[in-house]
Image: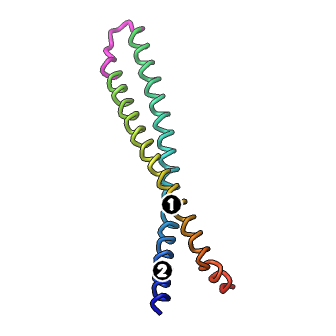
Amino acid sequence: MAAATMADSSLGKNMIADGLLGLLKPAIQQLDTHVHSVRESQVELREHIDSLATELCRINEHQKVALDLDPYVKKLLNARRRVVLVNNILQNAQERLRRLNHNVAKETARRKTMLEASGVFTSRSASQP
């Protein structure tokens, strides 16, 4: 009787763990996709900032009227620096998400193999219509 109770308890824990893993995996994949999209837009933004800064410098050099565009160029370069910093943070977060996703997939496969070896899947799937 105690062995059956322990097996039921173990099965319940595995089902809960599998349920949690099933919930986490799609969320992690979706988050990874969003981070990737944000990183792409950050790169695009950085390129536009570089282009705008170059254009402002070119305009400033060719102006007959002395306009001091240097503060604006400095602001753009500061914004570019922050974009690069955010991009690095996102890249690190995405790498952690990829590792987490890999670990979730590995743990799911391990649990499935463990359950199949114990006969839980075969007996449950045979009893279900």
Name the N-terminal-most of marks 1 and 2. 2
In the picture, the disc for residue 53 is: none
**70 shown above or below 76:** above
User: Where does residue 1 sit, x and y in percent of width and height?
Assistant: 47, 93
Task: Report the magenta stretch's main SS.
Answer: loop
Q: Quick one: quadrant of the C terminus?
A: bottom right
Circle 2: element type: helix
Q: Residues within 10 Å of mark 1 (few under 14, many from 20)?
A: some
Q: Does residue 92 lie above or below 6 as drawn?
A: above
**Segment tinted magenta in the rendering:** 62-72
* Residue 73 within the magenta-colored segment of the rendering: no
Does residue 57 show up?
Answer: yes
Q: Identify the disc placed on residue 104.
A: 1
Q: Which residue is mark 2?
A: 12
Q: Does residue 20 lie above or below 102 as drawn?
A: below
Number of on-image labels:
2
- When the figure is inspected, residue 107 is found, relative to residue 88, above or below; the finding is below
Q: Amino acid at mark 1?
A: Val
Residue at image position (41%, 38%) is: 88
Task: Give yes or no for residue 66 being in the magenta stretch.
Answer: yes
Q: Position of residue 7 (x, y in %)?
A: 49, 83
**Residue closer to the observer: 41 or 26:** 26
Q: Amino acid at mark 2?
A: Gly
In front: 30, or 106?
A: 106
Quick one: 109 or 71, which is closer to the camera?
109
Q: Is residue 26 visible?
A: no
Image spot of residue 16 (x, y percent): 47, 75
Asked where in the image residue 113 lies, by quadrant, the reply is: bottom right
Pointers 1 and 2 in contact (C-beta within 8 Å) = no
Q: Is residue 77 left or right of residue 117?
A: left
